[in-house]
Image (spheres, rainbow, N blue to C red):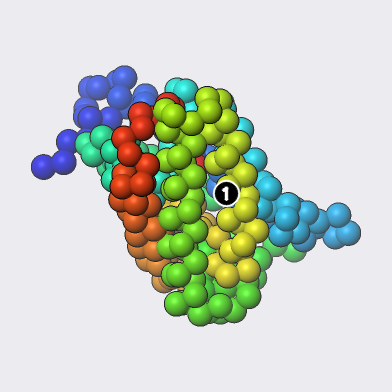
Amino acid sequence: MIDWPALRPGNSARIHEFTRLSLENLPLVFGGCGSAVISAAFPEVGIGLLGVALAFGLTVLTMAYAIGHISGCHLNPAVTIGLWVGGRFPANEIPVYIIAQVFGAIAAAAALYMIASGNPAFDLAVNGLAANGFGDKSPGGYAMGAGIAIEVLLTFFFLLIILGATDGRAPAGFAPLAIGLGLTLIHLISIPVTNTSVNPARSTGPALIEGGIALSQLWVFWIAPIGGAILAGIVYKVVGGSGQDIVGTEG
């Protein structure tokens, strides 16, 4: 039986931790997806693809500096699993972290929907909440195979950045910069393909609110990022040795 200590009745300290972990995941989905929904196409001064990519990267960068030393800044189920495979995270904590990550992402997507709906021109079916997808749901019309390939590959790269930047042998204090800029680059590459996931929680929040095709395609954005993360954890253990984790910072 899986032990979920943060959810044990009467364990107020662990319940507080679970609540904190959930709240920590609000900014990534709200900041990144919010920039896409509210600001990307704003008439004449919209931030566009570059702005959305920066919004995701800057959110992770700032949160990593703000809470990395407190909780490891765990915002992503794929990264949590990849860190476990890489020997950086205890297996018994994975379920609680993932539940908290998804809960926070759903809350952020709900808040974003509430705010976006304040514009009379907003239509959830038309505008959406920056959910991930392929085929008709892909911004560039890319097929499922392309979507799976890019999500596996870019999550693999993202985990290598995280594992390397948080290695005890890496220069101290620069991990959030490497991770945030890495996530920015990943978005610059893959927004046209899948709207960029590399994070199952980020995909789940908007998909649950949007429903329809976004929800039916959600499975891809769990399997592909987690698959890429597992591969990265294995590879880094082989090529990176046993460097001690300095913070556990992730995106």
**Toward which corner of the image does residue 80 lie, by quadrant?**
top left
Where residue 205 sits: x, y (%)?
48, 53
Q: Is residue 107 visible?
A: no
Total marks shown come to: 1
- Residue pictured at 23% horizontal, 22% vertical: 10
Q: Residues within 10 Å of mark 1 (few under 14, many from 20)?
A: many
Vertical relation: 42 (above or below) 101: below
Q: Secondary structure at mark 1?
A: helix
In the displayed structure, does residue 66 sit left or right of residue 5? right
Seen as rendered, the residue at the extreme top is: 13
Quadrant for the N terminus in the image: top left
Where residue 119 sits: x, y (%)?
74, 56
Seen as rendered, the residue at the extreme right is: 44
Q: Amino acid at mark 1?
A: Leu
- Residue pictured at 52% horizontal, 25% vertical: 172
Q: Is residue 1 visible?
A: yes
In the displayed structure, does residue 240 sit left or right of residue 128? left
- Residue pictured at 34% horizontal, 51% vertical: 235
Please name the residue that numbered disc 1 is placed on. Answer: 183
**Toward which corner of the image does residue 177 lie, by quadrant?**
top right
Vertical relation: 134 (above or below) 74: below
- Residue pictured at 88% horizontal, 59% vertical: 44
Where residue 96 sits: x, y (%)?
30, 38
Where residue 61 sits: x, y (%)?
60, 36
Depth order, front residue of 94/29: 94
Depth order, front residue of 193/122: 193
